[in-house]
Image: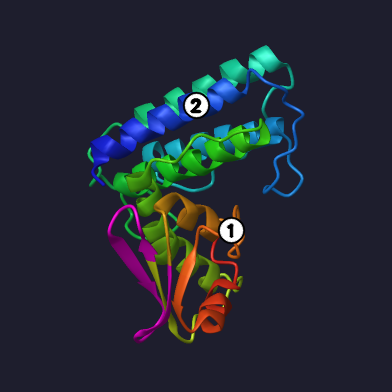
Amino acid sequence: MDSASLLHHLHDELDAFRACLDGDLSLPIEHCGGWTLHDLAEHLGSSNLWAAAAVTEQHGDHPATSAPRDPAELRQWFEGTSQTLLKALGRDPASRAWTFHPPHTVGFWQRRRALEALVHRWDAEHAQGGARPLDPVLAGEGVAEVFDTMAPRQIARGRARPPLSALRLEATDLGASWTYGPGSPVATLAGPAEQLLLLLWGRMPVTHETYTWRGDQQAGLNILAGTLTP
């Protein structure tokens, strides 16, 4: 996905998340370890500023920022963090930036932040009773990111084990596929890109009826059993 498309999605997903902040900020967020919507807004807004600093200041040491408790002030604060991020990322994607994984470019953050906003917008809307569909092309980009960035980082940090065999994921709505692990795939898991991404980020159970398996399903389940995402 090109830089312009990622920035367009980032803008739209941040706006959609901001709209959720007009609701009850005490709502629990199901898949975020006991967070409320306020907590999620603080996380997303603070990490907006962290990523912007990674570009403009070339380091990853930007301190976490506390969000205001007042709802009106929170909304204004979140909008400010979004504007700061979009301004920082509105440059040549090949420009150098500090990142926690290669490539060390602005393009890394354009992709990462669009996907971060996408998943957390889904979290917020899901908490409010009905999440809108994810863009399938962006969701497919998210599946690729899990395998080329998130899972290797989890392994490097000792949070996951390297896969001993390979699993193939197929996005039935994109005609795209990804292979994770060494050798020829022992199993294939197929489903729409949205559901594959939500599965990899722990938002959907692998037993959901939307998925279909071919090959050694148990071996495939074993590959997915690790914590591939933070």
Which residue is at 41% across, 58% downward? 143
Check if residue 182 falls in the magenta segment: yes
Report the side of 4 relative to 61 (left or right): left
State the residue position of label 2.
Answer: 16
Q: Depth-wise, is mark 2 or mark 1 nearer the camera? A: 2
Is residue 89 visible in the rendered image? The answer is: no
Look at the picture and state if 36 lies above or below 187: above
Disc with the residue nearer the chain's start (2 vs 1): 2
- Dot 2: what SS? helix
- Name the quadrant containing residue 214: bottom left
- Name the quadrant containing residue 20: top right
Which residue is at 41% across, 54% downward? 192
Is residue 14 visible in the rendered image? The answer is: yes
Q: Which residues are magenta?
A: 170-189
- Residue 83 in the image, given as x and y percentages of width and height: 43, 23
Which residue is at 32% across, 31% downward? 8
Q: Which amino acid is tagged 1?
A: Pro
- Residue 190 in the image, given as x and y percentages of width and height: 42, 65
- Colouring scheme, one of rainbow, by chain, secondary structure, one colour: rainbow
Alpha-carbon span between mark 2 and mark 1: 23 Å
- Residue 53 in the image, given as x and y percentages of width and height: 45, 38
Report the side of 226 relative to 142 (left or right): right
State the residue position of label 1.
Answer: 230
